[in-house]
């Protein structure tokens, strides 16, 4: 990896316009609609009084897969999405235009054998008002690119979960076509639809997008703690542990150690309590 070029990369602002259909399509891809007669679900699915899911901010104004550019000499085939942090500054409009402002926050060297963490920041800004809507930090694990030294800053480390039994659990069923729906919100990686590409990557079939799994976590938080009020979810951060397969039933485990603070994880019970999201933290109003 050309670490200095990566750290000093400058991004052009990205822009994204979206309408009510895009907002509804995203919601369908992350669990809303499982109860189509429930008025709480319809708030995210019906254009009359439509509300945008908070995690929609993760996909708006994406800079593209720039790490694949040979200029940076990143071993992109070994790249993994390791962690994701989202802070909501105000509710997302149900439709509108946003600007994505991007920067490389920092690089943390984990050694030759382990690789390096690349932390990338995105600010989502309302294009009309100039107001900040959300901040996103994406952490990528660059396997094979360690031994590069540390550069810049890193977000606060995600903390381990409580040792006690969870206080609340919620199971959410994913659909066999979940990744086919979710990819229409912007991530067209063939890993999530092409069986041959999935097999070449070591999977028996196409897998669900990591950010789709995070979207399901956002859905579970809204249902369990926020009465489906999107304005109450202020932030969420988590670590991706293992992939979810389409059709998996995900169990979300929650702890509330203090008012406004939620800790969580996600497992797939049918695969031996296979942890797929770990060290989750959310703040709610």
Image (cartoon, grey):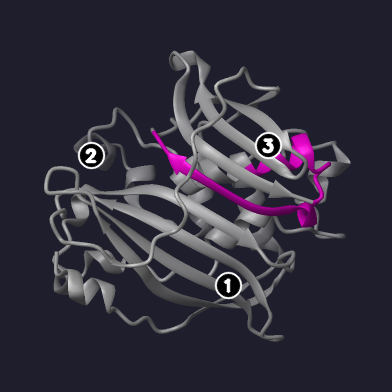
Q: Residue 101: tell me if it is visible.
A: yes
Q: Eyeballing the image, is 186 above or below 18? A: above
Query: Of discs 1 and 2, which sits in the foreground?
Result: 1
Q: Is residue 231 left or right of residue 97?
A: right
**Pointer 1 residue:** 124
Mark 1 nearby-residue class (10 Å; few <14, some 14–19, many ≥20): many
- Asked if the residues shown at circle 1 and circle 2 are in contact, with their CB atoms under 8 angstroms apart, the answer is no
Question: What is the secondary structure assignment of the residue under circle 3?
Answer: helix
- Vertical side of 68 occupied by 82: above or below: above
Q: Which residue is mark 2?
A: 201
Q: Work out how far the residue at label 1 is from the one at label 2, CA to CA, in angstroms.
A: 32 Å
Boundaries of the magenta span: 218-241
What crowding class fits label 3: few (fewer than 14 Cα within 10 Å), some (14-19), or many (20 or more)?
many
Is residue 272 toward the left or the right of residue 126 in the image? Answer: left
Left or right of residue 275: residue 124: right
In the rendered image, residue 70, in percent from the top left (x then y), is placed at 14, 70
What secondary structure is marked by label 1? strand
Q: Position of residue 93 (x, y in %)?
A: 74, 69
Q: Is residue 136 magenta?
A: no
- x, y (%) of residue 26? 61, 53
Residue identifier under label 3 = 220
How far across and how far down the image is residue 38, in percent? 85, 37
């Amino acid at each position: 990896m050309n670490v200095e070029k990566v750290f000093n990369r400058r991004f052009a602002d990205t822009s994204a316009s979206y309408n009510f259909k895009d907002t509804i399509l995203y919601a369908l891809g992350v669990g809303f609609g499982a109860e189509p007669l429930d008025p709480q679900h319809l708030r995210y699915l019906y254009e009359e009084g439509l509300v945008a899911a908070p995690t929609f901010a993760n996909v708006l104004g994406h800079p593209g897969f720039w790490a694949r550019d040979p200029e940076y000499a990143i071993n992109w085939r070994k790249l993994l999405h390791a962690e994701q942090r989202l802070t909501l500054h105000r509710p997302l409009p149900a439709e509108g235009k946003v600007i994505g402002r991007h920067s490389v926050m920092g690089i943390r060297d984990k050694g030759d054998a382990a690789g390096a963490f690349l932390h990338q920041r995105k600010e989502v800004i309302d294009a009309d008002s100039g107001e900040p809507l959300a901040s996103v930090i994406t952490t990528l694990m660059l396997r094979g690119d360690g031994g590069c030294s540390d550069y810049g800053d890193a977000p606060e480390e995600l903390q381990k979960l409580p040792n006690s039994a969870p206080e609340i659990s919620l199971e959410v069923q994913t659909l066999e076509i979940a990744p086919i729906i979710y990819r229409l919100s912007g991530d067209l990686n063939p890993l999530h639809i092409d069986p041959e590409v999935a097999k070449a990557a070591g999977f028996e079939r196409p897998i669900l997008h990591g950010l789709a799994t995070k979207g399901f976590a956002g859905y579970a938080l809204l249902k369990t703690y926020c009465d489906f009020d999107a304005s109450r979810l202020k932030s969420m951060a988590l670590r991706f542990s293992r992939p979810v397969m389409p059709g998996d039933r995900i169990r979300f485990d929650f702890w509330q150690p203090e008012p406004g603070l939620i800790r969580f994880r996600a497992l797939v019970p049918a695969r031996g309590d296979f942890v797929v999201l770990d060290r989750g933290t959310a703040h709610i109003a």
